[in-house]
Amino acid sequence: MTLINKSKNKVSLRTWLSVQLALGGAFTASWLLLPGTQQQEVIAHINRRPSQLDVVLRSEKATTVESLYDEAEVVSDEELASVLKKILPRFSRDHLRPNLVEHALRTWGSEIEFTNPDVISGPQMKEFLTDMAKFVDSWGKNVSPLMIAKDDGIHVRFAEDRSGSVHHDHTLAALTEAGLSLDDSVFTTARKMHIRNIVIEALRDFHLDERETEWSVMSFALWLAPQKTASWHNGEGRQITFDMLADRLMRNHKRDGVCLGTHRVYSLMLLVRLDDQYDGQLITKETRGQIMEYLTSARDLISASQRHDGSWNSNWTEGSESETKADPGEPMSKRVIATGHHLEWLSIAPIELHPPRAQILKAADWLIANVEKTPQDEIDTNYTFYSHVGKALAMWRHTSPAAFWTKWRTSHPDCEVFETSLKKSDGEPVPDSEASDSEASD
């Protein structure tokens, strides 16, 4: 009887081992059959921490997309100088809002030195955003820092309060457009890190279902296009491609999105230009065709919706019905947003995506006249909107505000003298720029 029981035990153990081996083999086979994308998702889920970024950033600085035009008929030297003087970044250093600095930095760059002490120079803007000691000097120790150190990345605090960035990856986009290097230092409250760590965290943190993707798309493309990297995996192990990003930008109605839907138009135009610059390695031909259809539609809408005075209303996507359906109480700032942003993306667009030339000239004339007649304190209050006007007009002269201004002031030494001194305020924007509605905010 004992021998029989021992025999049964041996058979049971052998069967158990066989089952385990079979299960292990099945699991291994199933694992090997999983696409790499899903393997990374499983690993990230099991570890309960983000996956390592599978992209090596090789370019010291991001690439640029230059204007295609130098049109003195659109804006003369004298007109451009007049506009740029009114968007010199005269900000109080007390409770200095990151959103103001980000717009000024992308407009003026990180190297320009202004002679007027009331004007914050490029290195100071860069320092405010990347050195948390300077940030604390402005906001005090009771406010959370803008830059927060992670294991090997830096999270930029946004959409929380006035001391944070307004939009996801807007800080990264500003630093990218301003020409900062991956190896430029970032001083968090924990330790010294680098711009590279901001880019890494942004790539890893990105999700396709985010509310705002305009600045993420632009930043990622400017960094990854030169090395012809068209895809990567985020921290959850999910593959992200520029085809997906383009589809995400085009998915909703044109009226949706930041700044009256104009930023997504700019980002899509940027993708096409970068795809041209880097041998068609960024997006597929199918996606490129879809983007061109989208941009052609945008061209047709602004051709039909321009007001008689040359500006565009916030509801430019209504086409020929825009003016009749416009809100009569709409603040002027929204027309500045729409008109300035449209001229900005048109400066990097090929002629076939332009409305008739006369409309471009009228839009520029309206913007120049608006800046000229608008009091300086009102422009300071609406700085984020007007910064796009200065940037757009400079691009239509195939230059940057910093390059033009540096040359201009050699023969106009008093160009940084103001009739009134800087008001000691924190540059409070009009309600539109504080709106939670992403159509209005900038």
Image (spheres, grey):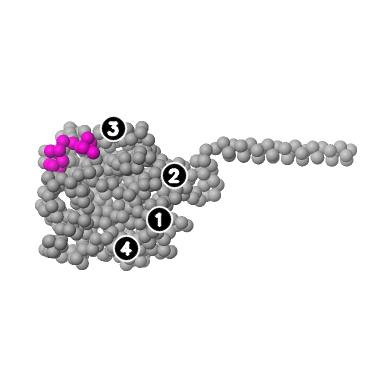
Q: Position of residue 192 (x, y in %)?
A: 41, 63
Where does label 4 land, which residue?
A: 127
Q: Position of residue 90 (x, y in %)?
A: 21, 61
Q: Which residue occupies 18% across, 65% down? A: 116
Measured in 3D between alpha carbons, the distance from the residue under mark 4 to the one under mark 1, in whole angstroms, is 16 Å
Measured in 3D between alpha carbons, the distance from the residue under mark 4 to the one under mark 2, in whole angstroms, is 30 Å
Q: Which residue type carries mark 4?
A: Glu
Q: Which residue occupies 35% across, 33% down? A: 285
Where does label 2 land, which residue?
A: 232
Q: Which residue occupies 52% across, 41% down? A: 36
Q: Earlier in the sequence, mark 3 or mark 4?
A: 4
For residue 196, the mark is 1
Residue range of the region highlighted in magenta in the rendering: 350-364
Q: Earlier in the sequence, mark 2 or mark 3?
A: 2
Nearer the observer, 70 or 322: 70
Q: Secondary structure at mark 3?
A: helix
Where does label 3 land, which residue?
A: 293
Q: Secondary structure at mark 1?
A: helix
Report if the CB atoms under discs 2 and 3 are less than 8 Å apart. no
Nearer the observer, 420 or 194: 194
Q: Earlier in the sequence, mark 1 or mark 2?
A: 1
Q: Which residue occupies 39% across, 59% down? A: 183
Q: Which residue type carries mark 2?
A: Trp
Up/down of 29 relative to 389, above or below: above
Q: Residues within 10 Å of mark 4 (few under 14, many from 20)?
A: some
